[in-house]
Amino acid sequence: PVIYVITPSKPGPTQKADLTRLASTLRQVPALHWIVIEDQPAPTALVAALLERSGMRNSYSHLAVQSEAVSAGPRYKTARGVEQRNLGIAHLRELVSAAAAAAAQLKRSPQRPGDQQGESETSAPEGVVYFADDDNTYDLRVFEEMRFTQHVSVWPVGIVGGLMYEGPVVDLATRRVVRWHVGWKKQRQFPIDMAGFAIHARNFINTPGELLSRSSPRGYLESHLLARFVRQLAQLEPKADLCSTILVWHTRTEAPDLSQEEAHPSDPLVEV
Ligand code: UGA
Ligand code: MN
């Protein structure tokens, strides 16, 4: 299965550094399509050139949509990346449908030597969707953990929510998720960061429309999204050694100190 990675990206002084670091990770992952959606009216030349150089070859898409309301500072109230992820999901549906149609076409075409007989006629969309923000840190193993997601898979996230890690707690006898290790906004139905789950692509085909809402308060984007697909904790597929290994960290890029720019302006022709 292909992993579709959806990354909203905010313009600003650290955008190029953040995307450079993420590209260095993602280009090492086989069968991965990276969908980058800038928070801009149109895709920028800076990100276009970065993606071209990234070594992702043709397996990326570069889109843009401007946020309705930009919420600033480290303790912002409204959710970020909503419009960008919704556009990414719309694009993902097109990619997955096109891939399924191509696979169906291949099966209808005359038998080639070595082909298996008796495969099913319908090509179910294959693939898994992961929302990877540009400032987190990803162990390469997290992608192979999520690749064989059947419905919705989950794992812990390091340094987030006021804890060393937040995550699902798995009952070792049943190997099912039974509760959460979480402190911040623990009343949420699915108290998990965006970096801690992956969803099978078919869910996005079967559930049309915009799946993220501007009106979700901060911290509820993930919970509201998962509630569309999951009713009970037992449906969740625990990954990363039954949720005991940290393979992703919610690192955040510090806002840079630009206090000397006014007195000593940097050359605007130098792309940073
Ligand atoms: C946490 C979660 O990790 C995010 O997935 C979630 O969207 C966010 O909270 C939220 O509740 O809104 P945090 O580190 O606080 O993340 O948020 P950022 O990393 O600043 O933003 C998430 C993503 O949206 C990033 O990829 C960022 O580049 C992008 N973004 C941010 C925009 O596209 N526009 C903005 O105005 C701000
Ligand atoms: Mn972040």
Image: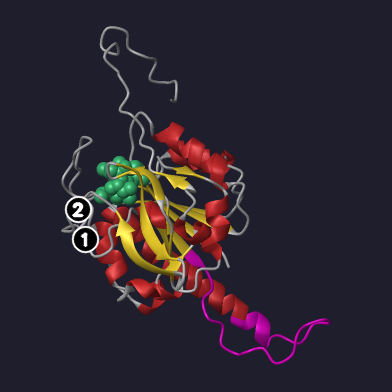
Identify the residue at the far right of this view: 113
Q: Secondary structure at mark 2?
A: loop
At horizontal 55% and vertical 72% (from top left) the residue drawn is 99
Magenta: main secondary structure equals: loop
Q: Is residue 199 left or right of residue 29?
A: left
Q: Is residue 255 left or right of residue 101?
A: left
Residue 268, by quadrant, is: top left
Pick the front one: 259 or 191: 191
- Is residue 80 among what the camera can see? no
Q: Nearer the viewer, residue 37 or 218?
A: 218
Q: Please say if 4 is above or below 105.
A: above
Separation of residues labelled 1 and 2 (CA atoms): 6 Å
The label on residue 188 is 1
Q: Position of residue 234 (x, y in %)?
A: 37, 74
Q: Quadrant of the N terminus?
A: bottom right
Q: Which residues are magenta?
A: 104-128
Instruction: Return the residue at label 2.
Output: 185
- Assess whether residue 227 is covered by the magenta stretch: no
Q: Position of residue 198 (x, y in %)?
A: 43, 62
Using the image, tell me which numbered label, if any, was put on residue 108: none
Instruction: Specify the amino acid type for callout 1.
Output: Arg
- Asked if residue 28 can be seen in this view, the reply is yes
Three-letter residue code for mark 2: Lys
Residue 262: image location, x then y, percent: 25, 12
Instruction: Please state the total of marks drawn on the protein image.
Output: 2
Residue at 54% in and 55% down: 143
Q: Is mark 2 within 8 Å of ligand 1?
A: no
Decide: marks 1, 2 in contact (CB < 8 A)? yes
Q: Which residue shows up at 54% across the image and 59% down it?
A: 145
Image coordinates for residue 17, horizontal then vertical, percent: 45, 32
